[in-house]
Amino acid sequence: MTTTTAAQKRAQAKVEYDAFLAQCPSRKLIDRIADKWVTLVLAALNSDGSHRFGLDCAGKPRSMRYSELSRLLAGVSQKMLTQTLRSLERDGLITRTVVPTVPVTVSYELTDLGISLHHLMRGLKSWAETHMDDVLANRATYDNRDA
C-alpha cells in the first residue's frame, strides 16, 4: 500500500481543478475576481493616479486609504467596498494595515499574489476602454436589425 504525503495530495488536487465544474474551488475564485469592484480595486491599488488624465493604471504598488479608494471608485457603496476589500484580504490578494492614530488610519495594499492578478485585470480594463466604441456600435447594429 502506497502512502501519499500532504504535499502530494495538494499537487494532485491542483491538477484536478476544473472551473467548468460547479463545485470546483477555482470556479468560486473566478466568480470572485470577475466582480467589477474587484477588478477596479485591484487596478486602483497599483496605480500612480495617472488614470485621471486618460493614462493607463500603471505604476508601482502603493497603499491607499479606504476614503481614497471610495473617492476613486465612483458609484461604489460603502457596504460593497467594505465587502470587496474583506474578500480580497481573505483571499490573500491585499493586506490591510491599521495604524493607531486619531482617528485610526487604515490602508490597503496589494500582496505579491494580488500584483500577479492585477496585471491581468489591468489588461481587461484597458481592453474594455479601448474597444468600447466597437462594442457600442455592435450593440446598436444588433438592436436595429429587427427594427
Image: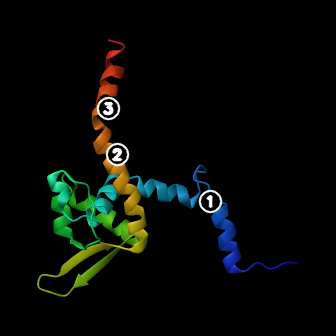
Name the residue nearer the viewer: 52 or 90.
52
Q: Is residue 134 left or right of residue 112?
A: left
Q: Nearer the viewer, residue 53 or 11?
A: 53
Q: Earlier in the sequence, mark 2 or mark 1?
A: 1
Going by the picture, which residue comes out furthest to the top?
147
Task: Kindly identify the amino acid type of the residue bearing the numbered disc 3.
Answer: Asp
Q: Nearer the viewer, mark 1 or mark 3?
A: 3
Structural distance between the alpha carbons of marks 3 and 2: 11 Å
Kindly identify the amino acid type of the residue bearing the numbered disc 1: Tyr
Q: Secondary structure at mark 1?
A: loop
Residue at the disc numbered 3 = 134
Q: Is residue 94 left or right of residue 8?
A: left
The disc label shown at residue 127, or none: 2
Query: Mark 1 to mark 3: distance in Å?
Result: 35 Å
Residue 38 position by quadrant: bottom left
Q: Which residue occupies the foreground of this view, 91 or 45?
A: 45
Point 12% across, 81% down: residue: 103
Three-letter amino acid code of the residue under disc 2: Trp
Q: Which residue occupies the extreme right position in the image?
A: 1
Report x, y in % for residue 21: 61, 51
* Disc on the earlier residue, 1 or 3: 1
Secondary element under disc 3, as helix, strand or loop, is helix
Q: Residue at x 25, y 74 (%)?
A: 63
Task: Give the number of the disc on residue 17.
Answer: 1
Return the x and y of residue 9 as percentages of the image width and height.
Answer: 69, 73
Q: Position of residue 14 (x, y in %)?
A: 63, 65
Q: Residues within 10 Å of mark 3 (few under 14, many from 20)?
A: few
Which numbered disc, 3 or 2, marks the residue that appears first in the sequence? 2
Q: CA distance from mark 2 to mark 1?
A: 28 Å
